[in-house]
């Protein structure tokens, strides 16, 4: 251990050494430092390695399905494990559709919350409300699913829809009989789940808007609302878009809550009231009961599709948010 | 130009709407917690914590196997994941200025967004398929894969908050870089790091999807790390989708225990940071 504690400044430096040599000796790092840094670098390299391994493994497991179905896997809707025919269109459609519904509900709500927390709320109210919104992000998804099955679905079916039907019944996306488990139920649950994420990140973005911007807006005679709408929100636009995309990423990959309320049917239905299916929900329900190797491979292939979509969506979101709040850890706002 | 009165009224109306939005956003938390108490509290008794599941129809039975299973697998995830996560976080904060740092930071954020169901099937191909059986170890490893990116990023943020003057003071006293980092910088940031770890643990404790194809779940009490093991979220999920009212009641009770655990961890994490801030 003695050489580990050797100091940076070696006393036996020759007095005649040039300034440059002395400077180099000062910058010499000890063996302990080299070992320490190497150790941390190895640990840090594990994460990129994991991402790479996931990608490689998903692709190699999906290869049999890729060879058999090719691109038609993405465009056909037959999902018949017994006859070995697989088309993922309903899964991809359902994933995008339910997430879109969630965004339509969640974005205005989350942005209004972020604006409330940074601009309008009295000081004493800000921390408690922000804490409660962040606690919502900590609720496990299986609990949202449980709540969806036994509270939300009966509420929508027995109380909300009967009131809305005379108004919306003729709109195509609300056609058909409403039994409960549906894209609508999944979209509402997803919206509740992603509001905290979008609100928390947008709040950070709005906090990063310099107060001189607000002062300038007010000095020009704008009301407080006009300042928020015309100055603060446009200033944080990039970060807010990042926050929304981040919420989209969450919604696309959400598994348990969706699997419990969406009805799990391999069908492309435009009506929000009909059951659907998502990629994550299909993997959760079918993976452990896969009847053949091809079935398993098809599930890996949709898993790979989901992986690619979420990696792209998240990469985009991080880059957008990083432009505003440089390098800040999105999602760690729960602290 | 619209009248001043109109503009002011419009502004007030919109401000009012943001108040309404905030109420609407936190309403689900209150509603969910209230429902869990109403539907779940009635089924919680001593047996619930000390007995395992019984075949349907028999009275009694509880969640002991699931509670113990969750505790074991979360501990495993901590054992696998916390050293890697904290180490990566310290690397990012202390040496993460270059291209490697940028890449690791970016990958950590991207991994954080990879759906847990994808992690689950990956863990299956690596840890379950080769060994031929489901195991708690695989479950713990899958949870660790979710834990590491969160811990890494929160640790980085906390270590970054340590003022540079402390590092310089330690180096000026003749500390080597590694001792300065471990004994001065990390120790200063310790409460923040612990908070980040608690938040991450709260998140993985509630995860269901990563355990589906790794730990699988188990109807019996088991502490065997090399075999299938029950977990709270898995059990809640199974009972919620089951056909019996009795199962539904137990699902609500299990969910109440789960959310109490998760929210308690989150609130403790907050308290740690707050205590530190007042102390400083």
Image (spheres, coloured by chain):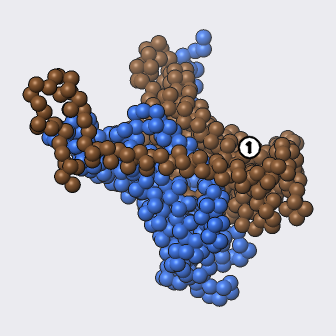
Chain colours: A brown, B blue
In this rendering, the answer to whether B163 lies above or below A165 is above
Q: What element carries label 1?
A: helix
Q: Is residue A250 visible?
A: yes
The residue shown at (65%, 61%) is B125
The residue shown at (62%, 85%) is B54
- In the current view of this chain or complex, which residue is farthest to the top? B1
**Total marks in image:** 1
Query: In the rendering, at what x and y percent does residue B226 appear?
Result: 55, 75
The residue shown at (62%, 51%) is A54
Pointer 1 chain = A
Name the residue carrying label 1: A96
| Front residue (pair A175, A225) | A175
Query: In the rendering, at what x and y percent does residue A325 appear?
Result: 46, 31
* A299 sits to left or right of A193: right
- In the current view of this chain or complex, which residue is farthest to the right? A83
* A260 sits to left or right of B62: right
Q: In which quadrant is the N terminus of chain B drawn?
A: top right
- In the current view of this chain or complex, which residue is farthest to the left? A15
Q: In which quarter of the image is residue A234?
A: top right
Q: Can residue B112 be seen in this view?
A: no
Q: In which quadrant is the C terminus of chain B drawn?
A: top left
Query: In the rendering, at what x and y percent does residue B69 appear?
Result: 52, 73
| Front residue (pair B49, A309) | A309
The residue shown at (63%, 66%) is B130
């Amino acid at each position: 251990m003695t050489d580990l504690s050797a100091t940076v400044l070696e006393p036996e430096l020759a007095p005649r050494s040039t300034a440059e040599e002395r400077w180099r000796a000062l910058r010499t790092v000890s063996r302990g430092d080299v070992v320490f840094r190497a150790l941390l670098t190895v640990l840090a390299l594990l994460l990129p390695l994991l991402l790479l391994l996931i990608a490689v493994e998903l692709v190699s497991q999906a290869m049999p399905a890729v060879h058999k179905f090719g691109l038609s896997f993405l465009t056909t809707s037959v999902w018949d494990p017994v006859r070995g025919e697989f088309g993922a269109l309903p899964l991809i459609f359902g994933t995008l559709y339910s997430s879109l519904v969630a965004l339509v509900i969640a974005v205005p709500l989350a942005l209004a919350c972020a604006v409330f927390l940074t601009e309008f709320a009295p000081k004493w109210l800000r921390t408690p409300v922000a804490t409660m919104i962040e606690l919502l992000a900590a609720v496990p998804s299986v609990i949202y699913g449980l709540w969806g099955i036994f509270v939300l679905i009966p509420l929508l079916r027995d109380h909300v829809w009967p009131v809305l039907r005379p108004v919306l019944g003729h709109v195509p996306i609300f056609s058909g009989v409403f039994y409960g488990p549906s894209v609508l139920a999944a979209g509402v649950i997803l919206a509740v789940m992603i509001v905290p994420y979008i609100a928390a990140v947008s709040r950070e973005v709005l906090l990063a808007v310099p107060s001189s911007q607000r002062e300038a807006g007010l000095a020009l005679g704008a009301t407080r609302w006009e300042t928020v709408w015309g100055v603060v929100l446009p200033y944080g636009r990039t970060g807010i878009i990042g926050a929304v995309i981040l919420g989209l990423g969450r919604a696309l990959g959400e598994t348990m809550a969706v699997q419990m309320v969406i009805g799990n049917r391999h069908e492309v239905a435009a009506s929000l009231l009909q059951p659907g299916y998502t990629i994550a929900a299909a993997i959760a329900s079918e993976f452990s009961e896969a009847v053949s190797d091809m079935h398993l491979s098809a599930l890996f292939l949709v898993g790979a599709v989901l992986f690619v979509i979420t990696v792209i969506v998240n990469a985009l979101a991080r880059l957008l948010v990083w432009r505003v709040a440089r390098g800040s850890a999105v999602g760690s706002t729960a602290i | 130009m619209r009248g001043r009165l109109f503009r002011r009224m419009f502004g007030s109306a919109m401000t009012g709407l943001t108040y309404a939005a905030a109420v609407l956003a936190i309403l689900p938390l209150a509603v969910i917690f209230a429902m869990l108490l109403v539907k779940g509290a009635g089924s919680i008794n001593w047996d619930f914590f000390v007995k395992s599941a019984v075949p349907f129809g028999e009275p009694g039975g509880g969640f002991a196997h699931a509670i113990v299973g969750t505790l074991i697998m979360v501990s495993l995830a901590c054992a696998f994941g916390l050293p890697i996560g904290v180490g990566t976080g310290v690397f990012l904060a202390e040496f993460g200025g270059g291209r490697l740092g940028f890449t690791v930071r970016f990958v950590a954020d991207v991994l954080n967004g990879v759906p847990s169901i994808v992690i689950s099937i990956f863990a299956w191909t690596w840890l379950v398929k080769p060994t031929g059986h489901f195991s708690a170890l695989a479950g713990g490893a899958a949870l660790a894969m979710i834990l590491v990116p969160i811990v890494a990023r929160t640790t980085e943020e906390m270590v970054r908050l340590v003022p540079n003057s402390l590092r310089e003071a330690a180096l000026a006293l003749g500390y080597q870089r590694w001792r300065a980092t471990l004994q001065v910088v990390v120790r200063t940031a310790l409460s923040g790091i612990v908070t980040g770890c608690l938040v991450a643990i709260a998140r993985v404790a509630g995860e269901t999807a990563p355990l589906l194809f790794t730990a699988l779940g188990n109807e019996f009490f088991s502490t065997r790390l090399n075999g299938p093991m029950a977990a709270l979220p898995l059990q809640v999920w199974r009972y919620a989708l089951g056909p019996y009212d009795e199962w539904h009641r137990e699902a609500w009770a299990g969910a109440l225990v789960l959310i109490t655990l998760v929210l308690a961890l989150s609130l403790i994490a907050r308290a740690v940071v707050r205590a530190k801030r007042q102390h400083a």
